[in-house]
Image: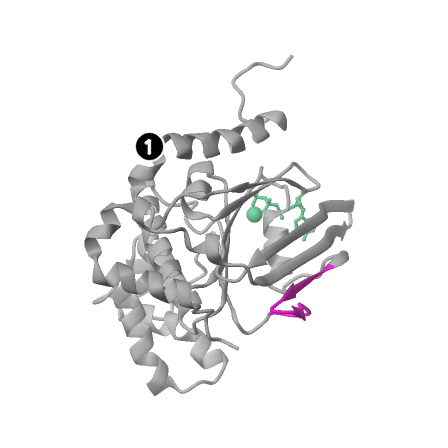
């Protein structure tokens, strides 16, 4: 199944957006889509992961329980080494939990599901293939009809501001452009689930802001479930419906913060009192873990 979960509320939201662009400037007029979603899609039950390495066992995750609704945008925040990538790898079926289970759309994850798009911190583009050939890679892997998918790839590149760059090579692009290509590739087959592991971590602040806005736009238009790992509290609160804060290794869920800010969110929302309140909540959790504090510990 590769179709997205285009439910009525999301489509309505898109139509409102199209019909009245002026409303974009009035986020308060737009209901947050996730507020109306109540369809469990991804279920993580009692998941633990221990790596057995030559240097001994490493407990990466412990007691992870989380239910994610269809079309929900989940942000995952946590200190380095707390198991965020491990969790994403388990969700993607690239790794098996040592205990517990994960199901997507009611089916237990036993290997990479085919309705999945993944974007990693480093874009992993193939340097010997052009931008278009990189985006079309999944079409080759799944042996789909090239003539059908080529126009869609071009359309998707256009949507992400890459029209005219189809025949360039990745090494001719900036970091932000490369990441856009990686997003186009992950989106091409219209996956219902997108897993993103610090996709914008290596970018400068302005490009990151731009891509945050683009990602929000794509998510609102295509109604995907997104699990987005980041180290940035601001990015997590800006993008997510719920922010899952993980504690230090072995990673556990320390808290889940509901973000009820209306959509579409403009960058200016970051200057509001409500945004500051939500960010503070996450920061305090990290301070309680002994992180992000200026006080000197002797
Ligand atoms: N293949 C592996 N073998 C042994 N230990 C591993 C392996 N992969 C990860 N780990 C360990 O598991 C823990 C969690 O790693 P993981 O990469 O999931 O953390 P992370 O939260 O993504 O960190 P970062 O924010 O730095 O990317 C770490 O202690 C790491 O050293
Ligand atoms: Mg990681």
Question: Is 220 left or right of 244, judged from the image as shown?
Answer: left
Q: Is residue 44 above or below residue 113?
A: above
**Residue 49 at x, y percent in the picture:** 73, 52
- The structure residue drawn at horizontal position 62% and vertical position 26%, both measured from the top left corner, is 288
- The structure residue drawn at horizontal position 40% and vertical position 59%, both measured from the top left corner, is 219
- The structure residue drawn at horizontal position 28% and vertical position 59%, both measured from the top left corner, is 172
Element marked by disc 1: helix
Residue furthest to the right: 56
Q: Nearer the viewer, residue 176 or 45?
A: 45
Is there any visible trace of residue 290 in the rendered image?
Answer: no
Question: Is 73 left or right of 167, judged from the image as shown?
Answer: right
Q: Is residue 246 above or below residue 276?
A: below
Which residues fall within the magenta stretch? Answer: 101-112
Residue annotated with mark 1:
271
Q: Quadrant of the C terminus?
A: top right
| 244 is within the stretch colored magenta | no
Q: Nearer the viewer, residue 21 or 95?
A: 21
| 106 is within the stretch colored magenta | yes
Q: Nearer the viewer, residue 284 or 34?
A: 34
- The structure residue drawn at horizontal position 45% and vertical position 80%, both measured from the top left corner, is 140
């Amino acid at each position: 199944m590769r179709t997205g979960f285009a439910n009525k509320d999301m489509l309505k939201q898109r139509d409102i957006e199209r019909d009245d662009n002026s409303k974009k400037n009035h986020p308060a007029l737009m209901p947050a889509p996730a507020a109306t979603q109540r369809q469990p899609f991804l279920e993580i039950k009692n998941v633990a992961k221990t790596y057995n390495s030559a240097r001994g066992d490493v407990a990466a995750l412990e007691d992870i329980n989380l239910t994610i609704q269809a079309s929900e945008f989940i942000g995952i925040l946590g200190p380095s080494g707390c198991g965020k990538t491990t969790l994403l790898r388990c969700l993607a079926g690239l790794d098996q939990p040592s205990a517990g289970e994960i199901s997507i759309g009611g089916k237990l994850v036993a290997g990479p599901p085919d309705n999945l798009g993944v974007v990693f911190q480093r874009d992993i583009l193939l340097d010997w293939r052009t931008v278009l050939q990189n985006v079309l890679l999944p079409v080759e892997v799944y042996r789909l009809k090239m003539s059908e998918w080529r126009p869609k790839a071009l359309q998707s590149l256009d949507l992400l501001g890459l029209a005219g760059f189809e025949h360039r090579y990745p090494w001719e692009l900036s970091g932000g452009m490369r990441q856009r290509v990686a997003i186009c590739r992950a989106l091409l087959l219209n996956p219902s689930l997108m897993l993103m592991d610090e996709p914008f971590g290596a970018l400068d602040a302005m490009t990151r802001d731009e891509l945050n806005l683009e990602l929000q736009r794509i998510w609102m238009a295509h109604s995907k479930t997104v699990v987005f790992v980041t180290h940035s509290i601001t990015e997590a609160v800006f993008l997510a419906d719920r922010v899952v804060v993980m504690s230090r290794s072995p990673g556990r869920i320390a808290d889940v913060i509901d973000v009820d800010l209306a959509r579409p969110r403009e960058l200016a929302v970051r200057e509001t009192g409500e945004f500051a309140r939500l960010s503070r909540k996450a920061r305090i959790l990290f301070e309680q873990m002994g992180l992000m504090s200026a006080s000197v510990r002797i």
